[in-house]
């Protein structure tokens, strides 16, 4: 278990401010954030390398805020490996363990057998990363901190190593906290996502929560939601604070949504793959059927990004290139943009 | 071939002038020393065999410089580590204070030491009571050498530590090493070359010291004092063999530094 309680810490130009979140024992947490968000500082704070100015760090239920790194029983793998340049590959892997057996197991797992006597300065970026992973895991930590560990790997190797890390996570019941700026990686690996920007936590939740129900327009844009529209919420029926059907307006655009946000200014977040395009209105359960005009069709591979104007607001829909072709979509073409009320997230 | 542009002609002239100036300086630096060794090097080596005073003086110089370097390393390497790794209030001031002995004229350094450690001072009396005579003794020589050359060791050792990424030590800590063991297993081996050359630089500076030593301890005579005495008492001719031996001695640390760093060594690749 990893828990941070209102942690503030500074390392050089990076600072964490009032950071709180919890990763359950045995689960896989992912921290995503842009460059300079303080992701590495966060890991180093958990590892005890960066001192905490205020707040509390908990590991396995114990307060470790003042515990030195060597007694936290964690493993850390940096983006740039940080192998000991004066030691061989074998010596690096065995650095933290007296147990040759575990070191040998790691060597085997990561296929390092052929590299053992090599000078670490002669390794490729991917090989260095493997050695760093093996070195951290050879001490059998039950908490593993990964700082963009796959970014130096080529795609084939990345798949391989990711599989190994996931297997080890499952076998050993390790708690993993993995820092990345890659949303795909976050969604694929994580049970829990922590969104970090400017040293602050913007949102913590399941990947689905963070991607489908961002807590703020900033999060929405950050996780790559294509449509973030400012406007107003009007209650239609039901209690004004509970979950209910509301009407969201932005200029000439009117959307129905299910939400518990209060009346007043808000943002509507709609993922592009939730918007369907049709030649005309249809009888269906889909609450939002908007008259729209195609502004732009941008094919990319098997998909096409179609920008439409609905009531003066531009919305992006992603559909298959085949559908775009069959519908004869071209700028100026009148279409109906359809999306369910549940696909409109208000924040 | 096309005629060079006038601008290129100007550049060539600048190159010639620069090269000429550089060569003149090089000649100025090397020629006197080369002259001494070339002219009197053999005399010097012969004097080593026949001149017991020169031999004793040389032995004394090597011994005191080595002792001063060991003492300097024992205190200076930890100090350099702290200056390189820790951020604390007064760090800049401390670094500036450490440079002070380097910019003070060396006889002044000797006078300052005399004021603190001389026979009449409280510290001097206390040391004397403990059986340590400072002025006119080997201890005095070591003190003078330490004062003028330890700052060189500290600043070179600090640079050596600066070149080792602190994250390597942090990784060692996460792998179970307490602070001192991480330093011993990671930082010291990686800084070793730099630390050795810091010691050599200090040693060389200690060997060549004259000003501070002569104020604190004229006798027993280290080699630099001996060469000065021979020059003032018996003239240039009798000073020359001693001078030649001292120049030859200076080649030793230079050779050691070349061996430690290699003729074309590059900075360590970072992990």
Image: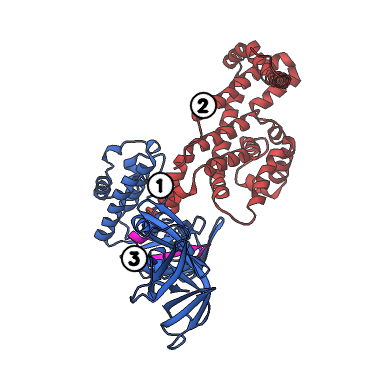
Quick check: can you spot residue A3? no
Measure the C-alpha gap from mark 3 to mark 1: 25 Å
Residue under label 3, please give it.
A191
- Which label number is shown at residue A81? 1
At a point 33% along the width and 77% down the height, the residue shown is A285
- Mark 2 lies on a secondary structure that is loop
Q: Is residue A121 above or below residue A42?
A: above
State the hue of chain B. Answer: red
- Chain letter for the residue marked with disc 2 in the picture: B
Numbered mark located on residue A155 in the image: none
Q: Is residue A145 above or below residue A228?
A: above
- Residue B148 visible in this rendered orientation of the protein: yes
Q: For the image shown, how many numbered marks are present on the structure?
A: 3
Q: Badges 1 and 2: C-beta atoms under 8 Å apart?
A: no
Kindly indicate the quadrant of the structure image that contains residue A188: bottom left
Residue at 39%, 72% in the rendered image:
A343
Disc 1 or disc 2, which is closer to the eye? 1
Q: Residues within 10 Å of mark 3 (few under 14, many from 20)?
A: some
Q: For marks 1 and 2, give the CA distance.
A: 27 Å
Q: Quarter of the image for the C terminus of chain B: give it.
A: top left
Identify the magenta region: A186-201
How far separated are the C-alphas under marks 2 and 3? 52 Å
Callouts 3 and 1 in the same chain: yes
């Amino acid at each position: 278990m990893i828990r941070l309680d209102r942690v503030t810490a500074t390392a050089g130009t990076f600072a964490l401010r009032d950071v709180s979140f919890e990763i359950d024992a045995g689960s896989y947490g992912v921290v995503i954030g842009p460059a300079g968000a303080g992701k590495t500082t966060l890991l180093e704070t958990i590892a005890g390398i960066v001192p905490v100015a205020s707040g509390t760090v908990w590991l396995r239920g114990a307060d470790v805020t003042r515990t030195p790194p060597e007694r936290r029983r964690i493993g850390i793998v940096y983006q740039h490996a940080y192998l000991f340049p004066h030691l061989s590959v074998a010596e690096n892997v065995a650095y933290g363990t007296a147990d040759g057996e575990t070191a040998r197991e790691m060597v085997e797992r990561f296929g390092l057998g052929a590299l053992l006597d090599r000078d670490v300065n002669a390794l490729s970026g991917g090989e260095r990363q493997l050695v760093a992973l093996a070195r951290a895991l050879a001490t059998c930590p039950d908490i593993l901190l990964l700082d963009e560990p796959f970014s130096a790997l080529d795609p084939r190797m990345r798949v391989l190593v990711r599989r190994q890390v996931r297997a080890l996570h499952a076998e050993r019941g390790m708690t993993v906290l993995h820092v990345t700026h890659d949303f795909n990686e976050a969604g694929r690996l994580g049970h829990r996502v922590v969104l970090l920007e400017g040293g602050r936590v913007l949102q913590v939740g399941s990947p689905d929560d963070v991607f489908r129900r961002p807590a703020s327009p900033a999060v929405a844009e950050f996780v790559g939601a294509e449509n973030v529209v400012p406007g107003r919420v009007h209650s239609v029926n039901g209690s004004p604070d509970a979950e209910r059907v509301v009407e969201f307006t932005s200029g000439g655009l009117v959307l129905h949504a299910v939400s518990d946000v209060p009346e007043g200014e808000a943002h509507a977040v709609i993922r592009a793959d939730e918007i369907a395009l049709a030649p005309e209105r249809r009888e269906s359960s889909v609450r939002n059927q908007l008259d729209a005009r195609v502004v732009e069709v941008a094919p990319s591979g098997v998909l096409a990004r179609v920008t439409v104007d609905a009531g003066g607001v531009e919305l992006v829909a992603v559909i298959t290139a085949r559908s775009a072709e069959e519908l004869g979509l071209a700028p100026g073409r009148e279409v109906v943009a359809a999306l369910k009320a549940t696909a409109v997230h208000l924040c | 071939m096309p005629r060079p542009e006038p601008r290129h002609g100007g550049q060539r002239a600048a190159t010639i002038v620069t090269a000429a100036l550089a060569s003149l300086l090089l000649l100025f630096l090397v020629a006197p020393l080369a002259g001494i060794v070339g002219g009197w090097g053999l005399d010097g080596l012969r004097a080593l065999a026949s001149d017991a005073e020169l031999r004793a003086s040389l032995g004394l110089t090597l011994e005191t410089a080595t002792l001063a370097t060991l003492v300097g390393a024992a205190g200076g390497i930890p100090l350099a580590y702290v200056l390189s790794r820790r951020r604390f209030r007064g760090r800049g001031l401390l670094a500036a204070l450490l440079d002070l002995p380097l910019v003070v004229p060396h006889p002044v350094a000797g006078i300052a030491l005399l004021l603190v450690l001389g026979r009449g001072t409280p510290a001097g009396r206390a040391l004397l009571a403990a059986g340590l005579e400072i002025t006119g003794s080997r201890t005095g020589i070591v003190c003078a050498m330490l004062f003028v050359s330890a700052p060189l060791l500290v600043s070179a050792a600090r640079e050596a530590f600066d070149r080792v990424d602190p994250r390597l030590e942090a990784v060692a800590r996460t792998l179970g090493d307490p602070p001192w063991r991480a330093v011993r297993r990671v930082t010291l081996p990686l800084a070793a070359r730099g630390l050795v050359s810091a010691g050599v630089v200090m040693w060389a500076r200690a060997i060549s010291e004259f000003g501070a030593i002569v104020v604190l301890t004229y006798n027993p005579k280290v080699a630099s004092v001996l060469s000065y005495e021979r020059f003032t008492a018996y003239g240039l001719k009798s000073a020359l063999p001693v001078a030649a031996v001292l120049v030859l001695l200076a080649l030793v640390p230079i050779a050691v530094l070349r061996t430690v760093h290699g003729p074309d060594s590059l900075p360590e690749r970072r992990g």
